[in-house]
Image: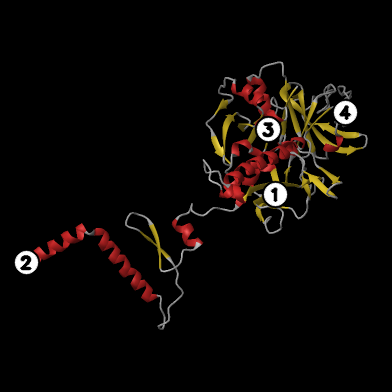
């Protein structure tokens, strides 16, 4: 008899699972509630999330708060406005998009002064030819004074590699196949005093100088100290001061009260107008960030100054030229990537943004093992085409802004590690109460941002110019 009752009970539970789960849940809630009381006085009600019968989420024992909303439905609440606008057509405004993802520094003024540190030069050329050493037996190893395009880049104990001038083996008779190396003894107003490290032996005098023509490349290399040296020539790097101005970008959206109350064939609301306005505003910011001119002028009608921000196009420190009369080939693209990634100590992943003409030329190339097109890469909310080479990786993207300003055959390579946004007024929205002020019967919203963009290390960025 007991077995039959147990089976009947189990069958009833099986047929009423949802009811049983609900009853058990309520019992647990009652137990927890009793545990939260102390000395007969109820504690502060704190909501909790429980699972529903169909995997839904429910809040019990308290009000719905923002914390509970984010816990139970992470996508329910919108983020701040600056995070919302990055979702509006990011492919059309890549510079603005990258600057928002990278974050910005607060600027306490509309005028932004910033410093960038350049690298010390490493390459120069010989301006005067050097004749072969004229020595006699018993003479000391010769020391000569050379003249270069930039004598100041050398310090005592530096070593210099003379490109395409052969050095000699230790016997001083046979050419080694290695380039000649020099050692800097001193630098004066007259020039740079040097000795040869692997020069020829002439009349029994070791490390003489072979004949060297003017115009050869000299490469500054590492310093070589002696055993008793405890000091070295000082190295000081002074940062270079640059300036940019923040520009106040504004966009206002209005909708009359009658327009808002009227029936419409489609659901065109104030929010739709805001999105369109944000896109137009971002396109304007994009063009200013790229090609703006840093100036301050006096508006005679407003009786105040207006600030204009300078674009990064004119801040880039290098140029690469393409010939408009010839098609782009793989050799030229290799040279482009070589110029973009060498001589600037920048990162090995950079972004190439160009007009439709330049992107079309690059797209027509047949890639090989040397340069090949990788898969599409998504970064900063943008989909890039990837170009890989031994020099580095380029993220390729079309920018119609270049077409609009008449530079469809040109582009710019930027290093995202050395691009910095300064913000005096963060992107914000403000409701204008034009009704109460008696201006007009409309709902009005104004969007504002005061910001500028700078390249912290100009030589890490390169303009691509077609001539």
**Which of pointers 3 and 2 lies earlier in the amino acid sequence?**
2
Front position among marks 4 and 3:
3
Q: Quadrant of the N terminus?
A: bottom left
Question: Disc 3 to disc 1, how far (Cα)?
Answer: 21 Å
Badge 2 local density, few (<14 within 10 Å), some, or many (20+)?
Answer: few
Q: Mark 3 points at which residue?
A: 401
Q: Mark 4 points at which residue?
A: 138
- In x, y percent, where is residue 455? 73, 41
Q: Mark 2 points at which residue?
A: 1
334 over 421 or under it: above or below: above
Q: Is residue 162 visible?
A: yes
Nearer to us in this view, 31 or 306 = 306
Question: Disc 3 to disc 2, how far (Cα)?
Answer: 86 Å
Cβ–Cβ below 8 Å for labels 1 and 2?
no
Residue at x-position 56% and y-position 53%: 79
Q: Can residue 86 be seen in this view?
A: no
Q: Residue 449 carries which label?
A: 1
Front position among marks 3 and 2:
3
- In x, y percent, where is residue 217? 79, 27
- In x, y percent, where is residue 350? 64, 36
Q: Of helix, strand and loop, which one carries label 3?
A: helix
**Which of pointers 2 and 4 lies earlier in the amino acid sequence?**
2
**Which of pointers 4 and 1 lies earlier in the amino acid sequence?**
4
């Amino acid at each position: 008899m007991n077995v039959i009752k147990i089976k009947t009970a189990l069958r009833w539970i099986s047929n009423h699972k949802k009811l049983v789960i609900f009853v058990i849940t309520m019992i647990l809630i009652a137990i927890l509630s009793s545990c939260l009381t102390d000395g007969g006085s109820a504690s502060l009600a704190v909501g909790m999330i429980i699972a529903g019968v169909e995997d839904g989420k429910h809040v019990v024992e308290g009000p719905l708060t923002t914390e509970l909303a984010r816990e139970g439905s992470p996508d329910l609440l919108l983020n701040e406005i600056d995070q919302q606008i990055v979702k509006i057509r990011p492919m059309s405004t890549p510079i603005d998009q990258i600057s928002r993802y990278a974050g910005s520094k607060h600027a306490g003024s509309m005028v932004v002064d910033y410093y960038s540190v350049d690298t010390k030069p490493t390459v120069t050329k010989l301006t005067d030819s050097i004749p072969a050493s004229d020595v006699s037996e018993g003479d000391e190893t010769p020391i000569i004074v050379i003249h270069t395009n930039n004598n100041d880049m050398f310090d005592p104990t530096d070593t210099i590699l003379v490109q395409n001038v052969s050095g000699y083996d230790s016997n001083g008779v046979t050419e080694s196949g290695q380039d000649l190396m020099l050692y800097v003894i001193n630098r004066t107003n007259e020039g740079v005093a040097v000795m040869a490290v692997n020069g020829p032996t002439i009349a029994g005098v070791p490390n003489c100088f072979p004949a060297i023509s003017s115009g050869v490349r000299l490469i500054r290399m590492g310093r070589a100290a002696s055993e008793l040296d405890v000091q070295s020539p000082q190295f000081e790097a002074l940062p270079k001061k640059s300036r940019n101005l923040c520009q106040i970008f504004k966009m206002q959206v209005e909708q009359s009260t009658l327009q808002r109350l009227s029936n419409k064939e489609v659901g065109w609301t104030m929010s739709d107008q805001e999105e369109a306005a944000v896109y137009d505003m971002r396109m304007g910011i994009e063009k200013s960030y790229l090609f703006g001119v840093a100036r301050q002028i006096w508006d005679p009608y407003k009786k105040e100054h207006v600030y204009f921000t300078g674009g990064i196009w004119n801040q880039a420190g290098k140029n690469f030229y393409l010939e408009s009369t010839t098609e782009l080939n793989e050799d030229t693209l290799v040279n482009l990537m070589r110029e973009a990634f060498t001589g600037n100590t920048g990162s090995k992943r950079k972004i190439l943004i160009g007009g439709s003409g330049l992107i079309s030329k690059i797209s027509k190339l047949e890639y090989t093992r040397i340069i090949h097109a990788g898969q599409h890469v998504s970064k900063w909310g943008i989909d890039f085409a990837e170009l890989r080479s031994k020099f580095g990786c380029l993220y390729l993207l079309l920018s119609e802004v270049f077409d609009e300003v008449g530079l469809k055959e040109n582009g710019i390579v930027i290093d995202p590690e050395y691009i910095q946004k300064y913000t005096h007024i963060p992107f914000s929205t403000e409701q204008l109460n034009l009704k109460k002020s008696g201006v007009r019967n409309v709902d009005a919203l104004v969007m504002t941002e005061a910001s500028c963009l700078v390249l912290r290390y100009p030589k890490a960025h390169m303009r691509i110019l077609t001539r």
